[in-house]
Image: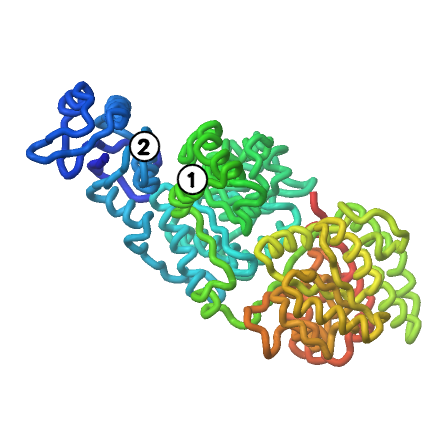
């Protein structure tokens, strides 16, 4: 067996480490309990005897193993190596090349401390909530952001792979806020899908309002020197995967404080331009956020780890030989365990079903999901506003109220999907920001076996969703609306609640599914469009959030940013008296707004449109 001895060099400063740090390092080879010199090993190889006496003890040996040890010693015995190699050997454990057993790795100083923490033998410090963070950090979120900080301080990239709804965004913002308060003022670059740019912006303004945010997105975005100067003035720069490739020459000019990739499965293919661009960016630290670190195969993991900690899993050919082929083709449990040991310290994945997470979570978690409009949606939206505002201004009384409600209805339909507004059975994919975000979220939910209720107030939108989701996911989707007779309705509920392999997605029109149903098998609730009546929405949510629900319920409320949907949501949040009025009246209170107020409500703002 082999034992490694590592001597730690003097540390310059924590946070300034890299995997290329040089450490003093040597190997000891032992047979039984006896440590042998290189010369003694050579003598053993020449004897070629199956049983030999070493220092008074008889030891059984294998001449092929002795040759392997000599070859290993010749290649590996060195006075210096990189921290990357030491950590890899320490985590890999098991056996070394040639089948040599690794008995132990002995380290001293900060190297020993680091290895113990990565192996989980020592705990890392839990950090306090930053003063400028506005909101509650749950205990598991404190642990998550402290873990990100720990790995960052030691020079390692980290993959936060928590289940959807556990707050990956919040934990990342907390880290950036703490750095800002400690005087680390270089901007952090966040790359995410276009569909969640607005979500990040809203979450930052809500939880970390001190952090100035620059959105590098849209036709009016800054470029070149102008962008460099603007970026330096902000704590967080948010851009998209599409622009990571398109604007790479601009983005690579900045030495970022950190680089964060959200929905990091977007770089799972290492050969794409955006994956290569991501790996080429310069930053003090790297973080990836994903609910699905492995989407299709273990090959996805190499690309994410290569971005986070370059070279740690070897090059692509080495990874394929050591892990991909043994795991994918041969289902080799030893290779799986080795890969888990190597990557485990750098991936934090908590599920909503984990006992220590359930106790941290409230029974119901509500969150807003901000979506973009496509260009088609935006042009339809503006055409409706331009066509109706003049007529509303000239009308009064019942006619005016009818026009306002009709306009709101049309705009909501456009925000959902152009095909719903046009009613023309046109193609579904690629035309709706909400639908794009729904697809991304459902992929993640179904990956972990969650069941979801999807509410819409429009039966025609429910029909569109059913057709699209069945084609996209290749599974049965239930759809309950006002026209479904009681017998069929009971059959649907029974299947969703009782069949272990039954449908995982259940679409309900808000009025048909809002009351009198018990659907506790679902732990995800999505309001695809809003009724703007808290009582009605809560009634719908309570189909799953009720006695008999054994899991925490995640409630997602979709809002198209920069549209009337966001404006009305802001009004309800801001004015409690309006919220109280809304409880019994739906949208009719909006008809009382003045023409100027309606114009402000309906006007499409720049942040509504994606790339």
Q: Residue furthest front?
A: 50
Q: Which mark is residue 335?
A: 1
Residue 208 is situated, as x and y percent measured from the top left of the image, at 50, 58
N-terminal of the two: label 2 or label 1? 2
Viewer-nearest residue: 572 or 586 = 586
Viewer-nearest residue: 21 or 90 = 90
Residue 367 is situated, as x and y percent measured from the top left of the image, at 60, 64
Q: Is residue 468 left or right of residue 401?
A: left
Residue 133 is situated, as x and y percent measured from the top left of the image, at 46, 61
Q: Is residue 160 above or below residue 578?
A: above
Residue 259 is situated, as x and y percent measured from the top left of the image, at 49, 42
Q: Is residue 34 above or below residue 176?
A: above
**Quarter-of-image position of residue 48:** top left
Quadrant position of the C terminus in the picture: top right
Q: Which mark is residue 159?
A: none
* Label 2 neighbour load within 10 Å: few <14, some 14-19, many 20+: few
| Residue 193 in view, yes or no | yes
Q: Residue furthest left?
A: 56
> How many numbered dots are placed on residues in this image?
2
What residue is shown at x 50% (from left), y 51% (from top)? 161
Quadrant position of the N terminus in the picture: top left
Q: Secondary structure at mark 1?
A: helix
Viewer-nearest residue: 530 or 611 = 530
Q: Which residue is mark 2?
A: 99
* Label 1 neighbour load within 10 Å: few <14, some 14-19, many 20+: some
What residue is shown at x 71% (from left), y 71% (from top)? 494
């Amino acid at each position: 067996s082999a034992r490694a001895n590592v001597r730690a060099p003097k540390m310059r400063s924590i946070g300034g480490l890299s995997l290329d740090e040089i450490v003093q390092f040597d190997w000891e080879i032992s047979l039984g309990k006896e440590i042998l010199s290189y010369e003694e090993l050579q003598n053993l190889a020449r004897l070629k005897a199956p049983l030999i006496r070493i220092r008074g003890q008889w030891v059984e040996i294998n001449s092929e193993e002795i040759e392997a040890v000599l070859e290993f010693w010749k290649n590996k015995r060195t006075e210096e190596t990189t921290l990357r190699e030491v950590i890899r050997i320490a985590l890999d454990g098991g056996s070394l090349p040639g089948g040599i057993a690794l008995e132990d790795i002995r380290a001293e100083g900060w190297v020993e401390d680091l290895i113990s923490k990565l192996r989980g033998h020592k705990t890392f410090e839990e950090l306090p909530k930053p003063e400028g963070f506005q909101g509650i950090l749950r205990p598991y979120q404190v642990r998550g952001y402290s873990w990100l900080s720990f790995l960052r301080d030691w020079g390692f990239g980290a993959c936060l792979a928590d289940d959807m709804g556990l707050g990956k965004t919040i934990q990342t913002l907390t880290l950036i806020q703490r750095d800002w308060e400690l005087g680390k003022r270089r901007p952090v670059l966040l790359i995410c899908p276009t569909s969640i740019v607005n979500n990040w912006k809203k979450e930052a303004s809500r939880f970390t309002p001190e952090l100035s945010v620059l959105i590098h997105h849209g036709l009016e975005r800054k470029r070149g020197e102008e962008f460099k100067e603007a970026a330096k003035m902000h704590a967080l720069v948010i851009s998209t995967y599409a622009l990571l490739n398109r604007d790479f020459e601009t983005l690579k000019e900045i030495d970022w404080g950190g680089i964060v990739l959200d929905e990091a499965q977007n770089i799972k293919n290492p050969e794409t331009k955006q994956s290569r661009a991501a790996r080429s960016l310069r930053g003090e630290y790297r973080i990836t956020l994903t609910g699905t670190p492995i989407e299709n195969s273990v090959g996805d993991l190499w690309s994410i780890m290569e971005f986070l900690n370059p070279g740690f899993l070897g090059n692509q050919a080495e990874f394929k030989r050591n892990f991909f082929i043994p795991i994918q083709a041969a289902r080799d449990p030893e290779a799986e365990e080795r890969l888990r040991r190597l990557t485990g310290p750098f991936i934090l994945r908590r599920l909503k079903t984990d006992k220590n997470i359930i106790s941290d979570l409230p029974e119901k978690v509500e969150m807003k999901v901000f979506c973009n409009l496509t260009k088609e949606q935006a042009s339809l939206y503006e055409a409706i506003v331009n066509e109706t505002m003049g007529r509303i201004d000239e009308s009064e009384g019942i006619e005016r109220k009818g026009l306002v409600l009709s306009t709101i209805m049309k705009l909501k339909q456009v925000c959902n999907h152009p095909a719903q507004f046009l009613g023309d059975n046109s193609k579904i994919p690629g035309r709706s920001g909400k639908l794009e975000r729904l697809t991304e979220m459902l992929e993640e939910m179904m990956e972990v076996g969650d069941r979801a209720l999807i509410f819409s107030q429009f039966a025609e939108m429910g029909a569109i969703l059913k057709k699209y989701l069945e084609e996209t996911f290749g599974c049965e989707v239930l759809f309950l609306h006002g026209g479904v007779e009681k017998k069929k309705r009971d059959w649907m509920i029974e299947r969703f609640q009782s069949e272990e392999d039954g449908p995982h997605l259940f679409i309900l029109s808000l009025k048909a599914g809002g009351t009198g149903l018990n659907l506790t098998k679902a732990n995800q609730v999505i309001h695809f469009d809003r009724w703007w009546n808290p009582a009605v929405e809560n009634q719908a949510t309570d189909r799953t959030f009720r006695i008999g629900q054994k899991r925490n319920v995640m409630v997602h409320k979709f809002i198209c940013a920069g549209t009337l949907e966001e404006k009305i949501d802001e009004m309800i949040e801001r004015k409690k008296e309006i919220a109280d009025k809304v409880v019994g009246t739906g949208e009719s209170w909006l008809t009382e707004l003045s023409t100027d107020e309606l114009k402000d409500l309906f006007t499409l703002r720049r942040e509504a449109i994606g790339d």
